[in-house]
């Protein structure tokens, strides 16, 4: 671990010292505020007079709804009754399609700025883009004859900016896809652009591109384990090597000061096999039979050699006197 930490610190210092932080690219900002006032449709006697729709020019084979239904759609508005025909025609087109075909389609790659600035050019056409879903919730569909009960409303942060959302309605979501008011899931969207939709933001009324898709193209993040982390593997190997070296050093150190092996304990039965064992009474009887011991007399084998030598010299001296 210590060598690995040192290498990481040195690499980080070199990166900051010689390369520096990458330049920050500010995403383009788009003004999405609705300048005009929306008509309050909660007033029963309100009368709305709309201009005649402009003829919608487009190849019917490339559109998700009929040109007659798409030309009645208005930008910079909330959902209107005139939008419903085109709205459900797009849903029927999506439901009859195949997700694999949408993945392989040659849908045009677009940005937020293109969708926001050219809504009429992209209306009803297949587009593709990437982004991160920040909020996803299921909403109930209005009464219809197409057996569509609900769909999923997603607020997506477009890849590359700006800090303005793209609203995407999905007919379904993949199994295990998270949903809620605060999520962070990168996805790819292939769907049909509907209109520039007006919504009530936290401050003012704003507009956002609205896209309809079958489902998000999502790759779940793999669950990382210790085996997938190379630094974790190196750390485990380093710890194992340190432990092995420590055990080896302890074994070598204890081998030099090992005490010599002690001899095995003596077999007392074999050592005392020739010793005559008798009782205390027997020992006293034998002592009485041996007779009294003279204090002055000493056993011949116990006399000191110096005393015996002195006695011999004395006898020789006495024999020499006349």
Image: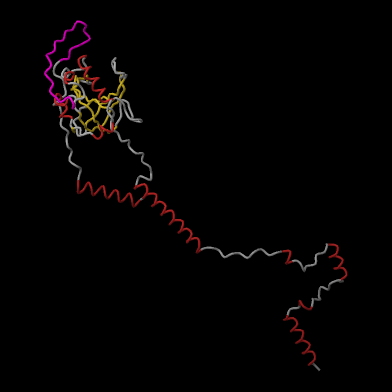
Residue 13, horizontal then vertical, whole percent: 25, 48
Nearer to me, 294 or 61: 61
Asked whether the viewer can see residue 103, the reply is yes
The residue furthest bottom is 322
The residue furthest top is 45
Indicate whether 229 appears above or below 282. above
> Does 76 appear in magenta?
no
Residue 264, horizontal then vertical, whole percent: 64, 64
Nearer to me, 232 or 141: 141
Q: Quadrant of residue 78?
A: top left
Left-right relation of 194 to 262: left
Residue 305, horizontal then vertical, whole percent: 73, 81
The residue furthest front is 61
> Does 47 appear in magenta?
yes
Left-right relation of 234 to 111: right
**Colour scheme employed for the rendering of this structure:** secondary structure
Q: Quadrant of residue 36?
A: top left
Number of residue marks: 0
Q: Quadrant of the C terminus?
A: bottom right
Q: Name the residue rendered at 87%, 68% in the picture.
A: 288
Magenta residues, start to end = 37-62
The secondary structure making up most of the magenta span is: loop
């Amino acid at each position: 671990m210590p060598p690995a930490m040192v290498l990481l610190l040195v690499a980080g210092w070199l990166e900051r010292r010689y390369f520096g932080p990458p330049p920050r690219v500010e995403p383009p900002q788009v003004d999405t505020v609705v300048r005009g006032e929306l008509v309050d449709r909660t007033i029963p006697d309100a009368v709305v007079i709309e201009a005649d729709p402009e003829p919608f020019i487009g190849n019917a084979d490339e559109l998700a709804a009929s040109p007659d239904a798409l030309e009645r759609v208005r930008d910079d508005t909330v959902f209107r009754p005139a939008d419903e025909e085109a709205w459900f025609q797009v849903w029927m087109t999506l439901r009859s399609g195949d997700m694999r075909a949408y993945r392989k389609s040659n849908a045009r790659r677009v940005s937020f700025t293109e969708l926001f600035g050219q809504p009429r050019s992209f209306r009803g056409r297949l587009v593709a883009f990437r982004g991160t879903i920040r909020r996803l919730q299921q909403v109930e569909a209005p009464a219809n004859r197409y057996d569509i009960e609900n769909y999923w409303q997603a607020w997506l942060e477009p890849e590359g900016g700006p800090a303005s959302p793209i609203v995407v309605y999905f007919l379904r979501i993949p199994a295990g896809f998270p949903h809620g008011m605060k999520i962070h899931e990168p996805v790819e969207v292939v769907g049909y652009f509907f209109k520039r939709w007006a919504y009530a933001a936290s401050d003012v009324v704003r507009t956002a591109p609205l896209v309809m898709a079958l489902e998000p193209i999502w790759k779940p993040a793999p669950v990382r384990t210790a085996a997938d982390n190379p630094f974790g593997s190196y750390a485990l190997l380093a710890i194992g090597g340190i432990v092995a070296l420590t055990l080896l050093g302890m074994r070598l150190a204890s081998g030099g000061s090992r005490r010599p092996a002690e001899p095995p304990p003596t077999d007392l039965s074999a050592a005392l096999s020739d010793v005559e064992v008798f009782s205390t009474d027997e020992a006293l009887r034998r002592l009485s039979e041996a007779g009294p011991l003279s204090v002055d007399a000493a056993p011949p084998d116990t006399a000191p050699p110096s005393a015996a030598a002195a006695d011999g010299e004395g006898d020789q001296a006495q024999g020499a006197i006349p």
